[in-house]
Image (tube, rainbow, N blue to C red):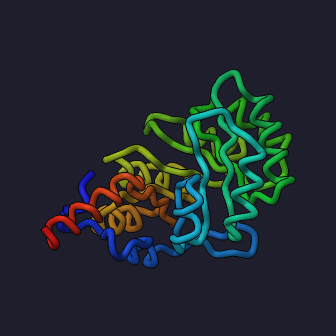
Amino acid sequence: MSLNQQDFLLSANKFDIPKSIEKSPGILLGEERIKSVLLSTDLSFIQNLSADAIMMVNPFDKSNEMDRVIIEFGRRPVICDIGGGLLREEQSIRLAAGAFKAGASAVVLTKPTPPEIVERIRAEIDGPLVYTVMLDAEDFEALFQAGVNIFNISTGEFTAETVATVKELVPESVIIANGGPHDSTIKATIEMGAQAIVFNPPTATEILRSIFDDYRNNNG
């Protein structure tokens, strides 16, 4: 990813959530209307970017201690990662219970999880359940019936098309989706039916590199 791409919405000197996300209708988390969701566990991003909500997902072991830190620091709705998968329902239930106790506004399954396990997790938790869609071949109708409250669509270059598919199969579903870093892809994703946009910012290394390169080019 390059910060020099012509239609990239961010710059190293003026770094914020893309304004095109405001065109989305938003979703309700509790009493809050959410249009932009920052995908990050980085406290510097959370402090400086004006997203409506935070989704904290990490590739390491999940922790309610981290949930509490980000919920207290972020001072806005937080969606906490509870993993998921075929054999981790007890862990997901435990993490979900701990996240809601810490003040989470919702929890998110971030590994493909069969509808029957989703149903068992749903029965044990009290709060919104978000399901991350990474493959467009999932059984959306069965997942919705099992208790998914919000679909989080993240199928790469096919995200907008997957949003349209889910809306067609489950018209009453609530959908958030990764719109990518460009105005054009964000608008397309919203037009296909996404009600809020998940924004994954460039890494701190990429931003710093862009700042340093700009400084060298203009002051060399």
Residue 172 visible somewhere in the drawing: no
Residue 128 visible somewhere in the drawing: yes
Image coords of residue 155 (percent x, y): 41, 44
Tell me the residue at 45%/34% (across/down).
Answer: 137
Question: Could you tell whether 87 is left or right of 9 in the image?
Answer: right
Q: Please, is residue 96 above or below residue 189 in the view?
A: above
Question: Could you tell whether 18 is left or right of 119 in the image?
Answer: left
Q: Which of the pair 104/149 is nearer the observer?
A: 104
Counting every numbered tag in the picture gives: 0
Tell me the residue at 63%/28% (across/down).
Answer: 85
State the image quarter where residue 111 is shown: top right
Tell me the residue at 52%/63% (across/down).
Answer: 45
Quadrant containing the C terminus in the rendered view: bottom left
- Furthest residue in direction front, as rendered: 220
Image coords of residue 179 (percent x, y): 39, 59
Tell me the residue at 33%/64% (across/down).
Answer: 188
Image coords of residue 169 (percent x, y): 50, 49
Question: Could you tell whether 177 is left or right of 183 in the image?
Answer: right
- Furthest residue in direction top, as rendered: 87
Q: Which of the pair 192/108 is nearer the observer?
A: 108
